[in-house]
Image (cartoon, helix red, strand yellow):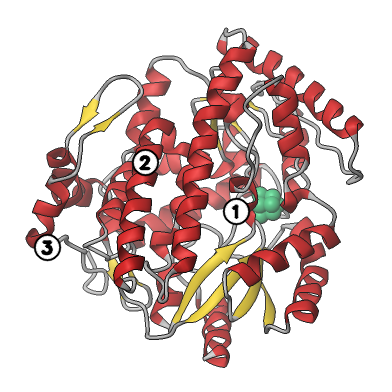
Amino acid sequence: MSAIYQPFRYPDEIKPLVLEKEDLVFSDGSTVTSEDIWEFMTVTGPKRFPFAFSTNPAFGHQLSGDVTLISSIRRAYFGMTGIDRVKNIVRKGTPLVIVQGGISNDLYLASGCIPVGPMFIRGWLMNLQEGRGYRKANFDGAALLEEARQNLSFECCNLIANIGLLKNRNLPIAAIAPCLCSRCSDMAYAVEAYKSQSGAIPAFLMDYPVNHDWGEWRTTYLAEELHLMAERLGRISGKEVTDADLMAEIKLENRARALSRECEKIWRSGEVPPTNSIDRGFHHLALMGGFDFPVANKILEETRDELKVRVREGVKGFGLADNPARLFICGSCVTPNQNFVDKKGGVLVGSDDIWSSICMDVKETGDPFKNLAMAYGSLPYERSTEERAQWTIEQVKASHADGVIFMYNWGCNYQSAVATMITDIIKNETGLPAIIIEIGELARMESLEQSQNRIESFIEMLK
Ligand code: SF4
């Protein structure tokens, strides 16, 4: 390993703190002990995923580095071992389907399918070879992206491009079945382009009303689309989806979303930011569930409890500057490198993308398809540009941000089209500094200087 990418190690002194936590009990009845987690995070993990444990002068740690926040260590364990759970799922014959970000997992899981985003495709191929260091992981990832682009289009964003890898790679994907929520320009294109390939797996879309008028028709239309999607997914999984199945899944995921909102509320209430920017990643857990929602919920509960203690005791997140510049991030599928932001004197205090879905609370009585349709139809991020901007302003104010960055990926036509209007409305109505940054580096780990320079300058301006 290069000298500049030294591995990060958890110090032995924290071992008792890790061991005193409860075992994790997974949906299939298997158990992981705290001893197993410690062993993985100090021995097996660094061998299997060296890039995840690497450090470098530009970013610092890949991991959070906050060694006394034990829920963060358990979340990192849960994240890194997700690939093992997926391999088990594939071995058992449960179908994996490609979905769109921003739409929750409730229907897919209730339908006996495992939803994964387009980035999973590349992640799966990368994980076939373990033991890769930081630089090698970066090179191999870039090569896969290039291959993917040649199969699909050079114009789509780096995320959607991964669908091109389905053309000539052996991947355990049973179908492409996204919801065309309004945020994304490229998913619909990618699905249609993919359909024309010979030997293609089934590809179908759940339509999403672009007319933003409220009204019963909107819910009715989305509920019909949800029923149709459940039927199609059921044909792939061999499972008939009942109302009871869907309601049970909604309750499980409502719990995750509620816990995540609780964590956010506690985090925001701190006199000082109680964690660094990486450790604010708990919302991902609540949206995707790490391939096991009951365990995700357990880790979210632990996160909430640790946050409460930190806020009460006025503990500041590891690696943060005193009085850091608080950044709110807008835009899809992108965030600045968290460690870089912290290192330059900032901290991330919120984002609109995933948060929109976390704010969704699906009604738990009555028709679950209709309830889910109502929730999807009201997602603030998917509404008209003006309405989305007004909701974002409320979130920016609640986060006590000092500044706003609207980021979008090169190739993301929808977000690039709305970026100026949303940023202008936020600027006018909050008086906060706000900038727009386009990036072309999604999933790249090196050569990020152009966007870094802009982020660093913005942080300097705020301080
Ligand atoms: S970056 Fe934009 S185009 Fe790409 S997946 Fe995200 S929303 Fe869609």
Q: Secondary structure at mark 2?
A: helix
Q: Are marks 1 and 2 in contact (CB under 8 Å)?
A: no
Q: Residue at x 46, y 37 (%)?
A: 289
Amino acid found under the numbered disc labelled 3: Pro
Horizontal and vertical percent for residue 401? 58, 76
Q: Amino acid at mark 2?
A: Asn
Q: Identify residue for label 3.
A: 11
Q: State yes or no: Cβ of the residue under disc 3 lies below 8 Å from any atom of ligand 1.
A: no
Residue identified by numbered label 1: 355
Graded by Cα atoms within 10 Å as few (under 14), some (14 to 19) or many (20 or more), the crowding at tag 3 reads few
| Secondary-structure class at tag 3 | loop
How much space separates mark 3 and mark 2, taking CA atoms?
27 Å
Query: Which residue is nearer to you in this view: 217 or 308?
Result: 308
The disc at residue 127 is: 2
Look at the numbered disc 1 and give the secondary structure of its residue: helix
State the image coordinates of residue 151 (x, y, percent, origin top left): 65, 42
Q: Is mark 1 within 8 Å of ligand 1?
A: no
Q: Position of residue 8 (x, y in %)?
A: 21, 64
What distance separates the C-alpha of mark 1 from that of mark 2?
28 Å
- Depth order, front residue of 139/325: 325
| Residue 248, quarter of the rendered image | top right
Local packing at callout 1 (Cα closer than 10 Å; few below 14, some 14-19, many 20+) is many
- Residue 346 position in % (x across, y down): 47, 80
* Amino acid tagged 1: Trp
Q: Which of the 4 image quadrants contains residue 439?
A: bottom right
User: Image point 31% across, 65% down: which residue?
Assistant: 310
